[in-house]
Amino acid sequence: MNYGIYELGMGMIGLLLMAAFWIAIIVGVVLLIKALIRRDERSDARARHDAVAGTPHAPGYPLPPSASAGSNSDALRILEERYARGDIDREDFLTRKADLTA
């Protein structure tokens, strides 16, 4: 068979496009896996931070019975930080703030 330059050029373009497609798929999968791992690491770090600070993520976490007026200001500060980070929504924030300031 006698192929002209046009046919050979189109074959090379098709080959390059197919290679670019598979490279894009592989890079996309790798980036997705990295993003999921990074999200999991941030979640673990936040859980460790909250465990140290004594503020778990569970909604409705009651204050300890020994909470005094001095610790209420610390609890309010922590509550405001959690709201700023987006850990709790506005309704939950206002409910807990009312409990702390009552």
Image (cartoon, rainbow, N blue to C red):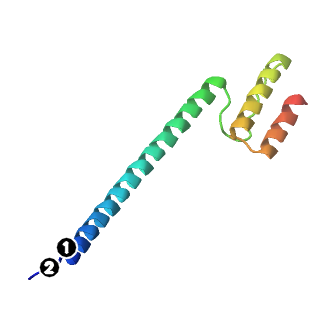
Q: Residue furthest bottom?
A: 1
Choose the circle earlier in sequence order: 1 or 2. Answer: 2
Q: Secondary structure at mark 1?
A: helix
Image-based side of 25 in relation to 84, left or right: left
Residue lying at 77% horizontally and 22% vertically, measured from the top left: 74
Q: Residue furthest front?
A: 5
Confirm whether residue 67 shows in the render: no
Residue lying at 10% horizontally and 81% vertically, measured from the top left: 2
Q: Quadrant of residue 61?
A: top right
Q: Quadrant of residue 46?
A: top right
Q: Which residue is mark 2?
A: 3
Q: Which residue is mark 1?
A: 8
10 Å crowding of disc 2: few (<14), some (14-19), many (20+): few
Image-based side of 20 in relation to 42, left or right: left
Q: Position of residue 64 (x, y in %)?
A: 75, 26
Q: Name the foreground residue: 91 vs 61.
A: 91
Q: Amino acid at mark 2?
A: Tyr
Q: Which mark is residue 71?
A: none
Q: Residue furthest top?
A: 70
| Pointer 1 with pointer 2, Cβ within 8 A | yes
Q: Secondary structure at mark 2?
A: loop
Q: Residue furthest right?
A: 102
Quadrant location of the N terminus?
A: bottom left
Q: Quadrant of residue 7?
A: bottom left
Q: How many marks?
A: 2
Q: Name the foreground residue: 83 vs 60.
A: 83
Confirm whether residue 35 shows in the render: yes
Give the distance between the C-alpha atoms of the residues marked 1 and 2, in whole angstroms: 7 Å
Q: Amino acid at mark 1?
A: Leu
Q: Position of residue 78 (x, y in %)?
A: 73, 28
Residue lying at 65% horizontally and 33% vertically, measured from the top left: 56
Quadrant location of the C terminus?
A: top right
